Amino acid sequence: MNGFIIFSGNSNPKLSQKICNYLNVPLGVAEVKTFSDGEIQIEINENVRSKDVFVIQSTCAPVNDSIIELLLMIDAFKRSSASRITAVIPYYGYARQDKKVAPRVPISAKLMADLLTVSGANRIITMDLHAGQIQGFFNIPVDNLYAASTILNYIKTNFQDNLVIVSPDAGGVERARAFAKRLHADLAIIDKRRDAPNKAKAMAVIGDVKGKIAIILDDMVDTAGTLIEATHAIVDKGAKEIHACCAHPVLSGKSIERIIDSPLKTMVVSDTIPLKSNAAACDKIRVLSVADLIGEAIIRCHKGDSVTSLFV
C-alpha cells in the first residue's frame, strides 16, 4: 500500500476523505491556497518521488477554479518526479460540450482532455461521463466508472413491483434500458425538445406509466428544467408516484426551488459533487456515496488488476 499516495483538491474534500477511509490510507498533505489576486498556489508537503500518485478533484463549481487547481497539482507532481499521476475526476466538467452543435463554437470536452494530458496526467478515472465518446478525446487510458450499481441497490431496497424506468430524453435511453432490464421493469421515454441551453420542453411520453411508480434516470441534474418537465409529463399520463435518480447533482440556478415545488417525491444523487446548503436542506434529496467504488478502482489501477467488473 505504501507505493501510492492520494491527494485532494478543494472541490470535494469529504468524498476524498471517504475514499481514503475505504482504502485505510491517510490523505496526502498538500496546501491548495489562493493569492490575494485570485491566483492559485499549490505546495505539496510530502515526498512523491517514484510514487504512484492519485489526485481527486471534481471539476464542479467554482468550475474554472477547480480545473486550474487540478492542472497545477498535476504539474507539481510531475515536477516532483512522481512515477505515475492519475487524475481521479468524479465529475468531469464541460462534458456537455462534446461536439460542434453550431458554427464557431468550441469542443470544450476535448480541450479539457488536452489540458489534462499536457499537464502531465498519465491516467484518468472518472464517473458517468455525459457522453462515452469523450474517452476517445484522450491519448491516455480512461476508466469511466458508473454509479449504476450503487443506484440499483438503492432502488431494489426501496422499491418492489410496478416500476417503470423513464429516460428524460432520447440520449439516455440506453442507460434507462439497462436499468429496466436489471430491475425487470418497464421502460418509458420522454420526447424532449430543447430550444436553448438549460431550457427544455417535454413533448410526449412514449410508453405506459399509468398507475406505476416512475423512476426518472439521468446522468446529471443541472437546472432541473428537463427533470421537472419530464415529471409533469409523467403526471399527466397518470403515474402513481415519481422519483428521480442521477449520478451528478450539479443543481445550479433555481433547481432546488423547482424540485421542491414539483410532484417529485424523492431525488437520489451520488456524492461526486458536494451539495450546496440549500440542496442539503431539501428533504426530497437522498445522497448515496460512491467512495467505495472509486476507492476500489484506485487500488485495482495501482495493482494492475482489471477494473472491468466496476463498469456495470
Image (spheres, rainbow, N blue to C red):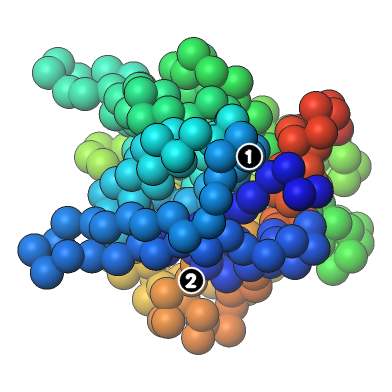
Residue 68, image x and y in percent?
29, 46
Residue 55, image x and y in percent?
53, 47
Residue 39 is at least partly visible in this image: yes
Question: Residue visible at 30% across and 25% down?
Answer: 111
Q: Quadrant of residue 114?
A: top left
Question: Residue visible at 65% across and 72% down?
Answer: 286
From the viewer's perspective, tell me whether residue 244 is left or right of residue 185: left
Residue 262, image x and y in percent?
48, 72
Of callouts 2 and 1, the N-terminal one:
1
In the depicted structure, whether residue 96 falls above or below residue 73: above
Q: Residues within 10 Å of mark 2 (few under 14, many from 20)?
A: some
Who is closer to the viewer here, 202 or 258?
258
Residue 211 is at least partly visible in this image: no
Q: Which mark is residue 51?
A: 1
In the depicted structure, whether residue 163 falls above or below residue 260: above
At label 1, the amino acid type is Lys
Who is closer to the viewer here, 259 or 84?
84
Residue, disc 2: 275
User: Are the two marked residues, 2 and 1, in contact with CB atoms closer than 8 angstroms?
Assistant: no
Q: Which mark is residue 308?
A: none
Tell me the quadrant of the picture where the C terminus can be found. Answer: top right
Residue 130, image x and y in percent?
50, 35
